[in-house]
Image: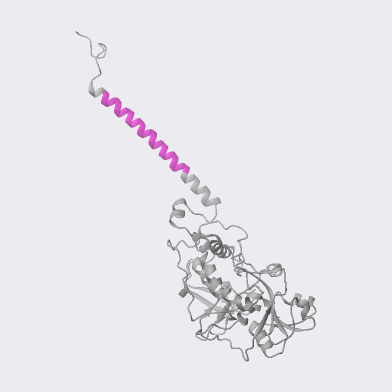
Amino acid sequence: MGQDDESSGNPPAPESVVAATARRSRSRQARLAALLLLLVVIVAATVRVVVATGPPTWDELRERAGLTNRDRLVIGVKDDQPGVAQKLENGAFEGFDIEIAYMIAEDLGFDAPEVTLLAIESEDRARRQARDASGSFVTVDLVVASYSITEQRQGQGVVFSFPYLETEQSVVTLASDSRKVASLRDLDRAKVCTLGTSTSERRLRDAGASPIGRNRISECIQALYDRQVDAVTTDAAILAGFVGPRPPGELPPAVKLRGRQELQHWDIGEEAAEKWGVNTGPNPAMRDLVNLSLQQSAEGPDGYRWKAAFDRYLASEQQYSNLQQVAVGRQPEPEEKVEVRQWPWERWALPSPSRPRSGAPTVAREPSRRNRRSSGC
């Protein structure tokens, strides 16, 4: 009768059960809190390691490239190359290179109204010097001007992006000329005009031709119309724009040619490919941003932008160039991979790391009827 409930084998009082349950609950909460704290420490340490040793973000690349507080991007382009880059009477530019320039600018964070295009001469492309509206030389941010990537130019300090177009050297003559041109050797002792800073001059000398250099390809074509030279040679993508007729209803070009005559486009069997790149200047971050844009165009969901520009301006000229291929109809594969740092939630929300400002897919910009055509090398 005098024994307590525990010694008598009776169940513990309800308050004892509650106390034991509370102790177990507090223990679980403590363990959970400790686990969460450990996870936070691990994540924080991982973030610090990734930030310290991993690739930069897109925003960091823009800051390193000096674009963060910029409201305008200046790009040097050609103005006398139909189909590639041509200036029209109303001051607008059009052509394949122009579309590529706007595509890259968009991926760098600049809308079309924030882009200034300046005509640049071939000899000034390496220095990135173009004349502005006042006639003064200014340094452009990028050069997108049918600029062939060569070891010599790279050795002289030109920093190129990944290639964005592959074409080859070709020749045009007057259609009335009975000369058949199957190789540069068929131009032995002929007067052949080409761009003075192009990759074509050495090949002409090796073939026995007499090269005549000009700073603008339109000057070479005019010399051919005037029969001052026998032929013109440069990249096929440039020459093709002078071979076919201008589509009806288009605005005339600002660079005028006199006495236009029908031309014959010749495939001279050159094995060496001419790959065009963007002169990005010496800033590595600017080069990486441009390469990232071209990488996304080649491999990402926005690849139709390159194809739309190619089909409109270059593929449409193929019918007038006979067997000479104007250019390869696919974007060259990037030579390496540009990496930018993105967290998983950014990858889910932002499918294109090169343009984090835009969550929605870009709608292809329909080139206006104001603009069309151009050339370079």
Residue furthest to the left in view is 1
* Residue 368 on image: x %, y %: 48, 78
In magenta, the rendered stretch is 17-42
Q: Is residue 152 above or below residue 229?
A: above
- The reply to whether the magenta stretch includes residue 39 is yes
Drawn side of residue 253 relative to residue 41, left or right: right
Residue furthest to the top in view is 1
In which quadrant will I find the N terminus?
A: top left
Which picture quadrant has residue 256?
bottom right
Q: For residue 169, say whether it is visible.
A: yes
Residue drawn 55% across the image and 72% down it:
311
* Residue 348 on image: x %, y %: 44, 54
Q: Is residue 23 above or below residue 213?
A: above
Residue drawn 63% across the image and 91% down it:
259
Q: For residue 195, say whether it is visible.
A: no
Nearer the observer, 154 or 259: 259
Residue drawn 25% across the image and 17% down it:
11
Looking at the magenta stretch, what is its main secondary structure?
helix
Drawn side of residue 103 relative to residue 231, left or right: left
